[in-house]
């Protein structure tokens, strides 16, 4: 079964790296009004190397998931951390559900509509994350965060 985890880890690593590359190109094209196209060996090497790295780490990740250490770590975090994690995930899932259920952009969504939907999905989560980090570092301080 160890080989199966490695194969699955490789596939997930390649897919994640390709998704990050396409997201990077989309963001750069949108923000700077460019028309960049991925070219060169790096666009192929990065997903393959990411897949190899995740293939090597996959058995350890599966062992940690099966041992329950991830679940313990989740429940040992503060209630604020758990709230912001769950709220962010729910927001990221609810925006596309709302868009595809109620069609606020009409029947056909153009690429600018998808860009707008992505911004609506990510901006509040990013602000919430930065606000929580600022609160935990600046307001709560190091004394209270250790208790």
Image (cartoon, grey):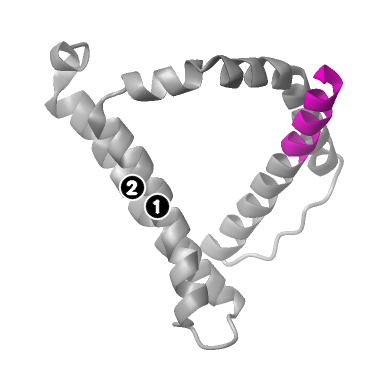
- The magenta region covers 1-14
Spot occupied by residue 138 in the image (x, y as percentages of width and height): 17, 27
- Horizontal side of 73 relative to 32 (left or right) equals left
Q: Residue at x 64, y 15 (%)?
A: 63
Could you tell me which secondary element the residue under label 2 belongs to?
helix
Please tell me which residue lies in front, 2 or 109. 2
Q: In the rendered view, tell whether residue 65 sits above or below residue 91.
A: above
Residue 10 is covered by the magenta coloring: yes
Could you tell me which secondary element the residue under label 1 belongs to?
helix
Image quarter hosting the N terminus:
top right
Residue 139 is covered by the magenta coloring: no
Q: Residue at x 68, y 48 (%)?
A: 19
Please tell me which residue lies in front, 42 or 122. 122
Spot occupied by residue 43 in the image (x, y as percentages of width and height): 80, 43
Q: In the rendered view, tell whether residue 87 sits above or below residue 136.
A: below
Q: In the rendered view, tell whether residue 48 sits above or below residue 57.
A: below
Spot occupied by residue 47 in the image (x, y as percentages of width and height): 78, 37
Provide the residue designation for mark 2. 87
Spot occupied by residue 54 in the image (x, y as percentages of width and height): 72, 25
Mark 1 crowd level (few <14, some 14–19, many ≥20, 10 Å Cα) = few
Q: Residue at x 34, y 54 (%)?
A: 124
Provide the residue designation for mark 1. 90
The answer to whether the residues at label 2 and label 1 have Cβ atoms under 8 Å apart is yes
């Amino acid at each position: 079964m160890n080989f199966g985890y490695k194969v699955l880890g490789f596939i997930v690593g390649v897919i994640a790296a390709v998704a990050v590359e396409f997201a990077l190109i989309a963001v750069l094209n949108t923000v700077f009004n460019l028309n960049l196209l991925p070219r060169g060996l790096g666009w192929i090497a990065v997903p393959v190397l990411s897949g190899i790295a995740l293939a090597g780490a996959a058995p350890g990740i599966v062992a940690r998931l099966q041992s329950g250490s991830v679940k313990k770590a989740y429940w040992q975090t503060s209630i604020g951390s758990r709230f912001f994690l769950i709220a962010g995930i729910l927001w990221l899932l609810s925006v596309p559900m709302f868009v595809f259920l109620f069609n606020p952009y009409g029947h056909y969504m153009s690429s600018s509509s998808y860009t707008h939907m992505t911004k609506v999905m990510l901006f509040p989560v990013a602000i919430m994350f930065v606000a929580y980090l600022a609160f935990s570092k600046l307001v709560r301080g190091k004394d209270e965060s250790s208790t």
